[in-house]
Image (tube, rainbow, N blue to C red):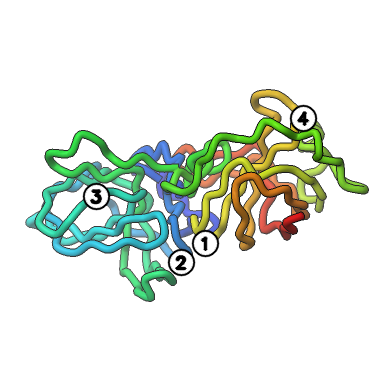
Amino acid sequence: MGDHHRRVSVVLAALLILAAGRATAQHAGAGPAEPGTASGRATESPSEWTGKVVETMTAGSYTYVQVDTGDEKIWAAAPLVQVKVGDTVSVPDGLPMRNYRSQSLNRSFDVVYFVGSIQVEGSKEATEAVHKEGPVQLPTKPPRDGATADPPPTEFSDIQRPEGGKTVEELFREKESLAGKEVVVRGKVVKFLPEIMDKNWIHLQDGTGSTGTNDLTVTTDASVKVGDTILVRGTVTTNRDFGFGYRYDLLIEDAKVTVE
């Protein structure tokens, strides 16, 4: 696997992401769907593992499984999937996180692979990841992590541009000149993806822009819900590449969020 697919940046460096073998993770990639920390990188891995589940647990919107392939035992995590001890599963190669600690599970793993899906033998569906746009889709498609994905609101008439702030459309139009600067924007939460890559992911719209310039991705430690009107203050990041196909032209990172 090339360095591009190994790159771990941010906590991705430790989803997907919101991850997937090709996590259309919109991964959950590492987009771990639950908070944790990690460091380093794992060793070379096969393109897929197949074996029996010897241990499984759920944390946030992710399912963790330990799989015995007959040659080794590996840990993998993917968006929620129905699986039990004894099931035979196939796990695609994903984002390896070495020395990963799951805060939700209060447990550390030498190596855990965040993937976009885990296929259970006999099952007709595999869980698909996310920043689902996360994670994962991470912003363009956030980390897909099995988190909230309600349809976006269509009423934005009550959204007012914040004093000294920008609209979503303006942020996209002016992203190059705004890169690295702090901005303020107001809008409605159209999607909320919690605890992915140690962050919460928000998709924000204010009624401005069109496809490609009307949906802003924000990372924060704040919790919100779909439909909330929020004021966001954070730093503009452009061309953020989390690996595994998770690349964002525009991202507001580590934002301070106020629910209005």
Which label sits in the foreground, 3 or 2?
Answer: 3
- Residue 4 position in % (x across, y down): 45, 43
Which label sits in the foreground, 4 or 1?
Answer: 4
Q: CA distance from mark 3 to mark 2?
A: 23 Å
Front residue of 16 and 42: 16
107 left or right of 92 in image: right
Q: Are marks 2 and 4 in contact (CB under 8 Å)?
A: no
The disc at residue 198 is 1
**Residue picked out by circle 3:** 82
Tag 2, which secondary structure?
strand
Say if residue 254 shows up in the picture.
Answer: yes
Q: Residue furthest top?
A: 210
> What's under tag 1, amino acid-wise?
Asp
Tag 1, which secondary structure?
loop
- Residue 160 position in % (x across, y down): 85, 41
Q: Are marks 2 and 1 in contact (CB under 8 Å)?
A: yes
> What's under tag 3, amino acid-wise?
Gln
Q: CA distance from mark 2 to mark 4?
A: 35 Å
88 left or right of 162 in image: left
**In the picture, residue 212 is in which quadrant?**
top right
Where's the C terminus, which quadrant?
A: bottom right
Q: CA distance from mark 3 to mark 4?
A: 39 Å
**In the picture, residue 199 is in which quadrant?**
bottom right
190 left or right of 196 in image: right
Give the number of callouts. 4
Q: Residue at x 45, y 61 (%)?
A: 34
> What's under tag 4, amino acid-wise?
Thr
The disc at residue 208 is 4
**Residue picked out by circle 2:** 36
51 left or right of 168 in image: left
